[in-house]
Every structure is written in C-alpha cells, then in structure tokens.
Image (spheres, grey):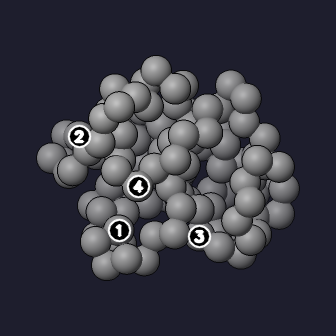
Amino acid sequence: MSVKTVEVDELNALMIAGKVDIVYDVRESNEYQMVRVPQAKNLPLSSFSPEQVEEPKNRAIYLICHSGQRSLTAAVALESAGYTEVYNVVGGTAAWEHAGYETAFG
C-alpha cells in the first residue's frame, strides 16, 4: 500500500479552485486551535478511527498534521478501511505556514 501525497502548493491551488471537499487535521485540539489550514476539520489522531469519517470511500480526503507523520498514519488507516482517494499533505502545517498560505486560528 502506497499512500498518495500532495505538496502544500498543489493543495492550496486545489482549494482556491474549489476542488477540495475535505481536509482533516489530525493534530491534537490544542495544536489545531493555534494555527490551521482554513478549511480543515479537526480529527485528532489520538482518538482517530476510520468510522469517524463520513465521506464516501471514493471521495478525495486530504490529511494534514504538523509535519506529515501523524497524517500518514491516519492515511494508512483510511486506505486499510477501503478509502481509495486519500492524500497525505507533505510537510504538514509547518510547510503550509512556511509557504505563506492563509491560516486560521481559534
């Protein structure tokens, strides 16, 4: 099993084009509150299970964390549960911030 990846530049372009349905931020709630990708919903890895994901199994789901490691773990879990369009965001929110893209807080 090989998880698909997406760079922050590509994710940002897809979001601007309105082609991203769901981004899950799998960091803990306190991290999520500090800074996040504007469209991201929080689904902490510490309590993550594929059953929490309500999207159809063929819909594109983007997973992000701080650096890309926790989101990779979540992506593997979703793929194992039969999701076919799962993308791990390379470099996570750290790369997103470094690129200067819009962020949300609170």
Q: Position of residue 11 (x, y in %)?
A: 36, 63
Given residues 52 and 58, the one toward you in this image is 52
Q: Position of residue 47 (x, y in %)?
A: 73, 29
- Pointer 1 local density, CA inside 10 Å: few below 14, some 14–19, many at least 20: some
Q: Could you tell me the amino acid type at mark 4?
A: Gln
Give the numbered dot on residue 97: 2
Marks 4 and 3: which is nearer the front? 4
| Residue with the mark numbered 4 | 39
Seen at 23% across and 40% down, the residue is 97
| Residue with the mark numbered 1 | 15
State how far apart marks 2 and 3 are (Cα). Answer: 23 Å
Q: Position of residue 65 (x, y in %)?
A: 48, 37
The extreme top residue here reads 30
Marks 1 and 2: which is nearer the front? 1
Q: Could you tell me the amino acid type at mark 1?
A: Met
Between discs 1 and 2, the one toward the N terminus: 1
| Residue with the mark numbered 3 | 60
State how far apart marks 4 and 1 are (Cα). Answer: 8 Å
Q: Secondary structure at mark 2?
A: helix
